[in-house]
Image: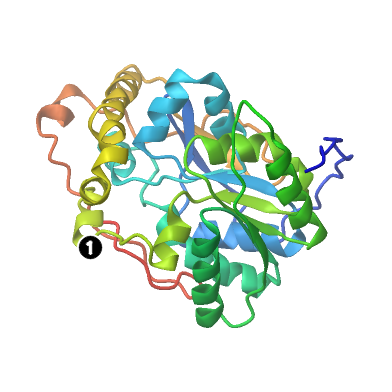
Amino acid sequence: MTAVQAVRPPQAAAPPLAVPTRSWPRVRYGAVAVDGLAFDDVLEVLHGRLAAGYGGVVVTPNTDHLVRARRNPEIAAVYEQATLSLPDGVPLVWMARLLGLPVREKVSGSDLLLPLLRTAAAAGAPVYFLGARPETCRKAAARALAALPGLRIVGSSSPMVDLNGDQTAVLEALDEARRLGARLVVVALGCPKQELTMARHAWRVPQATFVGLGASLDFLAGDVRRAPGWLSAAGLEWLYRLCQEPRRLWRRYLVDSLGAAPVFGSMVLGRLRARPLVSERRALGWPASPPVPAAPAPTWAVFRDLNVAVSGSAPAGAGRGARRPTG
């Protein structure tokens, strides 16, 4: 392979977004900010960006990601600067509801993939798969094309990624995505490789929105089975995955995830001390705004019973497609 020179092209300012969703709340979970958007609103915003070829980075943090961001400033910066940061975990929704914060619905990557591909087809946006095994990409692409008329998957690549080593394979894959006109790049490298790869190199495909979706291509291809809907709604999808891959996942779920407790504890203290945990996210240029009012800070009485009921789900939308209940 020949070395690929990284020369950043000049970036033009994007025109105004032609979508009704102009702003939404963004809630802080320690070092990670999470957007309080409903599932259909996410698709609405992404449709506008894909149709216009704006580019951007979309991340889907869960409790494991909160821990990684708390320990690694570079990972925290990825979530801070992301175009969209979507809550991929029922515990994040539970914590927000407990504290009266405006994150009301889980938007997991595995639920998002097919509706996102449907949105790309409707927006006329070519798609590129980055990550997962070549056979997984092939099977996922075949299933998606069979289910979604009008979808264009223009290529895929499964480069070996070494965050501290040679980046040639990744850069060549992204140069191919740019040449093929991709406007949606589905990145399936797992955390933190996909987040850091997107943050460092997404500029090479300036017209594309990069979405980090972890094992979603494996689910779509049928290589890995998803948990039953009732386990997912109960926040126990992690247990199902742990039983499937105990050697690979035991430390993440049984040891590392305990590091999220200080994050949630700091949120509780922040609400009790009336510290602002909510800000406004705007669609036009994504500027930071002063904090917007949230629900009144709870008292200690709220925490006497932590069996928080998560009830109700968002109404079905035409662009959403079939997906799991979130509680």
At a point 33% along the width and 40% down the height, the residue shown is 92
Q: Is residue 217 left or right of residue 154?
A: left
Task: List x then y, in percent, for residue 263.
Answer: 34, 23
Residue extending farthest to the right is 10
Q: Is residue 39 visible?
A: no
Q: Quadrant of the C terminus?
A: bottom left
Q: Is residue 293 above or below residue 44?
A: above
Task: List x then y, in percent, for residue 48.
Answer: 67, 61
Q: Which residue is mark 1?
A: 228
Q: Is residue 296 left or right of residue 193?
A: left
Q: Is residue 118 left or right of residue 327?
A: right
Q: Is residue 284 or residue 13 the one in the foreground? A: 13
Q: Is residue 182 left or right of residue 30?
A: right
- State which quadrant residue 66 falls in: top left
Task: List x then y, in percent, for residue 320.
Answer: 46, 69
Q: Is residue 31 visible?
A: yes
Q: Is residue 119 or residue 201 the one in the foreground? A: 201
Q: Amino acid at mark 1?
A: Pro
Q: Is residue 300 above or below residue 143?
A: above
Number of marks in picture: 1
* Mark 1, secondary structure of its residue: loop
At a point 61% along the width and 31% down the height, the residue shown is 289
At a point 63% along the width and 32% down the height, the residue shown is 288
Task: List x then y, in percent, for residue 36.
Answer: 45, 45
At a point 50% along the width and 41% down the height, the residue shown is 25
Q: Quadrant of the N terminus?
A: top right
